[in-house]
Image (spheres, coloured by chain):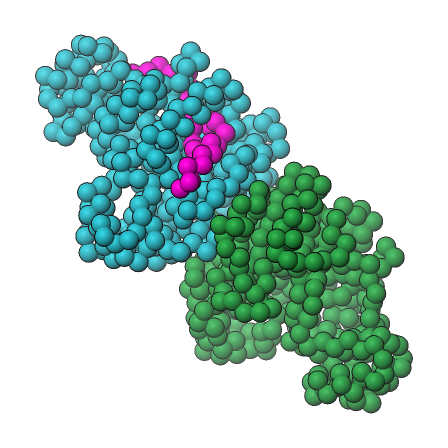
Chain colours: A green, B cyan
Amino acid sequence: MKLGIVGGGQLGRMLAIAGVPLGLECQFLDPNPQAPAGAIAPLNVSAFTDQRALRALARSSAVIGFDWENVSVEALRKATRGSGARIAPPLRALATGQDRLLEKRLFERLRIPTTRHAAVNSRAALWRAAAAIGLPGVLKTRRLGYDGKGQAVIRKHADLDAAWQSLGGVPLLYEEFVPFDLEVSGLGVRARDGTVALYPLVRNWHDEGILRLSMAPWQAPALERQARRHVRAVLREFNYVGVLAVEFFVRNGRLIANELAPRVHNSGHWSIEGAVTSQFENHVRAMAGLPLGSVASTGHSAMINLIGQVPPAAQLLQVPGLHLHDYGKSSRPGRKVGHCTIIASSAAERDRRTRSLLRALHLRLKQVP
Amino acid sequence: MKLGIVGGGQLGRMLAIAGVPLGLECQFLDPNPQAPAGAIAPLNVSAFTDQRALRALARSSAVIGFDWENVSVEALRKATRGSGARIAPPLRALATGQDRLLEKRLFERLRIPTTRHAAVNSRAALWRAAAAIGLPGVLKTRRLGYDGKGQAVIRKHADLDAAWQSLGGVPLLYEEFVPFDLEVSGLGVRARDGTVALYPLVRNWHDEGILRLSMAPWQAPALERQARRHVRAVLREFNYVGVLAVEFFVRNGRLIANELAPRVHNSGHWSIEGAVTSQFENHVRAMAGLPLGSVASTGHSAMINLIGQVPPAAQLLQVPGLHLHDYGKSSRPGRKVGHCTIIASSAAERDRRTRSLLRALHLRLKQVP
């Protein structure tokens, strides 16, 4: 069976690898001729909005999906119409994941606690929002933000104009700044027949807006119960098919939903070696209408993103239990070019190895156990 | 780094998948345009002896390897000369793995118990061998035998002429027939720097000459000690680089070496999900001069070959803890078209699930626990 994926980044590449043993052939559409998925699967180099290319993908695929959010919902809807191809995950989830305001409204509708916020479309609206919600706050573009891009933290009234000048002109959202205790994410997968499986809770560490470290399973039963309830509610709401992630802040033992991703997620990469069935395999299984595999963890995992450039493999692979994932991307400051996962048979051993690897990578993060 | 692999079967395909996350790009040479590795990696469709194609592969690869034994050692040696490409595993091991008589001589030289045998090049020599070694026995072609092909069991003198007629004309080997209690295999890997790692002992079940089932780790400490010693001796003898397998018969608690494979081996497929580092990953790591990964098992594994055709994925994936590997080959009776691996947290649970799957596949094997 052929799966057509719009976007051929590292997520697409890992979906393709997961599909091969199941007889599921991924094919990609991406404007970048060097897109990582192209190294192992057919890649049609076209703009994401190219109707001819999208229609060709839809006609030659049983199911159409995407490996990132910034894909045109309208272009996809139009291209798949009458093609016979299913779409998974559903476009309604994609549209919500693209727009921070729709995300917040979804969370509110499902009674999932989230940050106080206001839509901002003018300089005056920004001042009103800051007055109503208070300072400090964060001004974000509603669309096209990722890895901390398209955001400005506002600590005092004097920052408001600078923030407006750097981001204004597109629809914005002003949110309260949450002085969180920690960050976690919940990942779930839903099959075409409605079966749901929820991965163990993940704790995340960001630095300069970019995910640096994830640990799973993160043993925090009360938080995990909340995360499971929330992720399950989102999956049900969309009649979802595939993997979905929700990122949460944790403050005083309560989860506050930050954003959702209607796709496999960086905080789930540990599952390739650390779970019975990886998020990538379960995503393609769900797309193809196959039964889901177990999401149980097989050990204690830490996933560390490699940012900018991949250190020499010969050096990384000396760390016991380390698995390397080089995305085959060229080096560039701030770019996610790979990740590595450490698996250990106890949390203490995982933590020890993780600290040692973080030191070797000159990466300082707070509160790493 | 580019690895050139002569032969693009399922072993090559799984090597390629293992290489991708490490930034190791496999490229293949195979006369079959539908060779399984071609689905995910560049495939040069040429005869195995095509000097031009072999030289092109050698010139564009840092290391040259092979995914089966029936490759011309001379053609490979000639093609790589002056190309700058290393060869791993070494050609001396390949030459030995191609010839049952050289294998036996190696085992004898290393004091590894093996079957009594005699080279047979004429009808008269066959009668002499049967008289010296006794009946029953097995007549085998020295070269090009696999999956039970190129063999004839001789139970009585009257079978000798028929066996000669079916196999005569090429160099043969007559061996004693070993009424073994069980079959096991030992898999080891040796890095370029001489580091050796030995996978847990595997028990194998064949049917009509084809491997059907492997279980690992097979808990038999006395047998495992012997297997480790023997595999280590072979790796050292060849100054080996990569994964190597030795198949043994077991009789009265003693190992009797049957044959060796200078490559990843069907009885090691369980390691993809059942070991910290799979045989495929360790093989490409060794080829690339990288450190080896741990070969420890992560659970209790059973690998079942899918012969002839792959049952519907939707059916197989309903078995808890089952991982499917569809090689993307067309169906044909007796052909290995895929395998599946069951992982469980206890041997008893693995055994229970294995029996259930064997029943579903209508496969009857003796002595399955």
Q: Position of residue B332 (x, y in %)?
A: 33, 42
Q: Residue at x 58, y 73 (%)?
A: A71
Where's residue A93, x and y in %? 66, 67
Give the residue displayed 81% in from the left and 52% down from the top. A223
Choose between A49 and B227: the one closer to the eye: B227
Left-right relation of B169 to B296? left
Residue B147 showing in the rendered view:
yes
In the image, taking residue A186 as reference, residue A334 lies left or right, namely: left
Look at the image and say whether residue B74 sits in the magenta stretch.
no
- In which quadrant of the rendered view does residue B279 lie? top left
At 85% from the left edge and 83% from the top edge, which residue is drawn?
A157
Percent coordinates x, y for residue B55 in the rendering: 23, 54
On the picture, is B328 further left or further right than A135?
Answer: left
The residues colored magenta run B176-205
**Residue A8 in sight:** no
Is A43 positioned to the left or the right of A216 in the image? left
A176 to B166, vertically: above or below? below
Viewer-proximal residue, A161 or B127? Answer: A161
Whether the magenta-drawn stretch holds residue B181 is answered as yes
Spot occupied by residue B335 in the image (x, y as percentages of width and height): 34, 39
